Structures are given as C-alpha cells and as structure tokens.
C-alpha cells in the first residue's frame, strides 16, 4: 500500500472566505501515484474547515450569510472565549461546516457525485493556515 502526505497553505485576506481546493487535491493525487484508495483532506486550524459542496457563488454567499446568523462575529463581547481574542465565532462556524472530508479514489480520479468539489472554509483569516492531504491506497 502507498501512502502520501502533503500540506497545502492558504492565506485568505478577508476574515471569512471559501476557496475551491479541488485542483490542488487532484494534483496531490497525481503526485501520489495511487489509483485506488482514499484521500483525507482536513483543516489543521480550529477556525477553518474543509467541506464538499457545489462551486456556485450564490451558494457560497448563502453559506456566509447563514453562518453569520448562526454564529455572528459581533458583538465579540458576547462570547466567553473572546477574553483577549475575537475569534469565538470562527470556532463555532468550523464546528458547523466540519473539519475534514474523505473521498474515494477510483481509477486515479476523485470519485465525486455530480457537482461535488472540495472547499477550504476560512472563518478567522488574514494569516497563513494549512490543510493536510493524506492519500492511501494502491
């Protein structure tokens, strides 16, 4: 069995944002040489997320609005975690959107359903953060 590991780094200039990372994960798959197996993609920071959904700007806008309603950034004084910090909402948004995804690899390709893509979700940006890609298989 083969094993491959790579870190992808992102620096989203805004506090929140969504980045389609499918091309980078597909490049990792090519580098790995794995044709049948699994890929794990996970955010290595507790105010960021990795999730699968449609690459449609209206949907991403809706995610942003919905998450801000569920866990608003302000007032920062509304969160106990924010004593000396201001990112409690980012922790909550990450919990909602998830830490990681696992995708099957079939025939050297990510085995997606229609419209599925992998996204990095940033909820406390303006600094470098990493995503782990771990591939195992034959």
Image: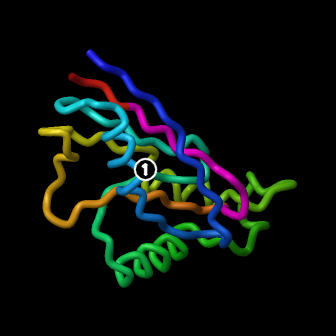
Q: Nearer the viewer, residue 23 or 100?
A: 23
Farthest residue to the bottom: give it: 58
Please state, as top left, top right, bottom left or bottom right, where the C terminus lies in the image.
top left
Judge whether 118 appears above or below 73 on screen.
above
Q: Residue at x 44, y 81 (%)?
A: 61
Residue 75: give x, y in percent of width and height.
74, 74
Which span of residues is magenta-colored?
125-134
Name the magenta segment's main secondary structure. strand
Q: Residue at x 48, y 67 (%)?
A: 18
Farthest residue to the right: give it: 84
Q: Nearer the viewer, residue 131 or 49?
A: 131
Q: Residue at x 31, y 19 (%)?
A: 2
Q: Residue at x 41, y 75 (%)?
A: 60
Residue 78: give x, y in percent of width and height.
73, 66
Give the number of callouts.
1
Q: Which residue is mark 1?
A: 98
Judge whether 57 appears above or below 39 on screen.
below
Is 112 positioned to the left or the right of 44 in the image?
Answer: left
Q: Secondary structure at mark 1?
A: loop
Is 41 positioned to the left or the right of 132 in the image?
Answer: left
Queried whether the magenta region covers residue 126, the answer comes back as yes
Residue 10: give x, y in percent of width and height.
59, 55
Is 112 positioned to the left or the right of 82 in the image?
Answer: left
Label 1 crowd (10 A; few <14 / some 14-19 / many >=20): some
Residue 126, picture quadrant:
bottom right
Please state, as top left, top right, bottom left or bottom right, where the N terminus lies in the image.
top left
Which color scheme did the rendering employ for the protein? Answer: rainbow
Farthest residue to the top: give it: 1
């Amino acid at each position: 069995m083969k094993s491959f590991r790579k870190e992808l780094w992102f620096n989203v200039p805004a506090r929140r944002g969504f980045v389609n990372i499918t091309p980078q994960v597909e490049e990792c798959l090519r580098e790995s040489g794995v044709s049948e197996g699994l890929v794990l993609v996970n955010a290595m920071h507790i105010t960021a997320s990795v999730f699968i959904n449609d690459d449609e700007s209206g949907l991403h806008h809706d995610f942003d609005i919905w998450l801000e309603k569920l866990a608003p950034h302000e007032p920062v004084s509304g969160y106990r975690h924010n004593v000396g910090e201001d990112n409690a909402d980012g922790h909550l948004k990450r919990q909602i959107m998830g830490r990681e995804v696992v995708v099957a690899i079939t025939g050297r390709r990510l085995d997606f359903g229609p419209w599925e893509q992998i996204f990095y979700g940033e909820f406390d940006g303006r600094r470098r953060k990493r995503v782990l890609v771990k591939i195992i298989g034959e």
